Image (tube, helix red, strand yellow):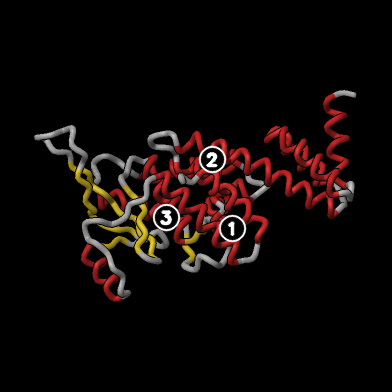
Amino acid sequence: MTERNELNAIIQLLEDPDPEVYEVVSNKLVEYGTALVPSLLQVQYTSTSDLMQDRIDAIIHQIQLKTAIEQFKQWQSISNPSIIEGLMLVSAIVNVHFDKEATLQLFEQIRKSCWLELNNYLTALEKITTLNSVLFNHIHFKGELDMSKEEQLFNIEFVLQFKKGNMLSMGALYMALAQVLDLPVKLIKVEDHYLLAYVDSQISFLDPEQKPVESIQFFINPLLGDIYSMEEIEAFLKTQEVDFEKDNFPFHTNQSLLLHYTENMFQFYTYKEAYDLADLLKAFLNEVTPP
């Protein structure tokens, strides 16, 4: 029996109602890794068995979970890892049909549209105003305030395709675009509020080895693209009775952003009682979160 025929025979055993047989078969199929996913999807597409459909979904999720854990450990070891790569990695855990190539193409199209409108002669405020005009007026991105409304708003492929996201996914996408465009924009969270901050870094001429001093020039609303001064944000947060330190806003690094993103996805699926997907994200977090 050829390897291909043997693999097909193993896949067909997924319809066996015996739980012990399924456990052996699923463990064997997971060992094949991501190379097996297209074959499983093909079988799933032609199958009329609900049991087969559900079991193939479960196996693909386990394959993608295993792959995501391995890739994330490599990703977070890089000094400045790509945010979009991280967002794709996390989205794929819960979406068996996630298309990485299509997502990258969408991101690249948006990056290019923004890059064509920017130049080095613009001030920081002019650059962000231009970027916001492209994203919200030309491409027509729109944000959803309620983060518990749609699960797809955490899926970066959906966000890029339909130009719609929640506070966190829009903020993460904006930060990802800003980094590839060499704009020093960072995502911050104060209580239940997400904001983007344009951060200026000053290096001491007397001591170049000293860590750069970072200061916020202005803030950006990730849902609308509106720009606010420090004074306006201070006044708003005071009306919300939010405690904050003006000189110590909690910036997200790329690594902390992805862990925070995954934690919010876990909380969302738990709230929606989609416990099978929540369990996948919890298993991922348990493996990649520092003790």
Q: CA distance from mark 1 to mark 2?
A: 17 Å
The 10 Å Cα crowd at callout 3, few under 14, some 14 to 19, many 20 or more, is many
Residue at the image point whose x is 58% and y is 41% from the top = 68
Which kind of residue does numbered mark 2 sit on? Leu
Which kind of residue does numbered mark 1 sit on? Gln
The 10 Å Cα crowd at callout 2, few under 14, some 14 to 19, many 20 or more, is some
Q: Is residue 129 visible?
A: no
Location of residue 103 with respect to 163 vertically, above or below:
above
According to the picture, the residue beneath numbered tag 3 turns out to be: 171
> What count of labels does the image hold?
3
Earlier in the chain: of badge 2 and badge 3, it is 2
Residue 151: percent from left, percent from top: 59, 60
Location of residue 71 with respect to 20 vertically, above or below:
above
Q: CA distance from mark 3 to mark 1?
A: 15 Å
Q: Which mark's residue is nearer the viewer, 2 or 3?
A: 3
Residue at the image point whose x is 47% and y is 57% from the top = 141
Earlier in the chain: of badge 1 and badge 2, it is 2
Residue 144: percent from left, percent from top: 49, 65
Residue at the image point whose x is 46% and y is 67% from the top = 145
Location of residue 183 with respect to 249 vertically, above or below:
above
Q: Quadrant of residue 137?
A: bottom left
Q: Secondary structure at mark 2?
A: helix
Q: Which mark's residue is nearer the viewer, 1 or 2?
A: 1
Name the quadrant of the N terminus. top right
- Which label number is shown at residue 152? 1
According to the picture, the residue beneath numbered tag 2 turns out to be: 104
Q: Secondary structure at mark 1?
A: helix
Q: Is residue 165 visible?
A: yes
Residue 188: percent from left, percent from top: 35, 56
Outermost residue to the left: 206
Q: CA distance from mark 2 to mark 3?
A: 18 Å
Which kind of residue does numbered mark 3 sit on? Gly
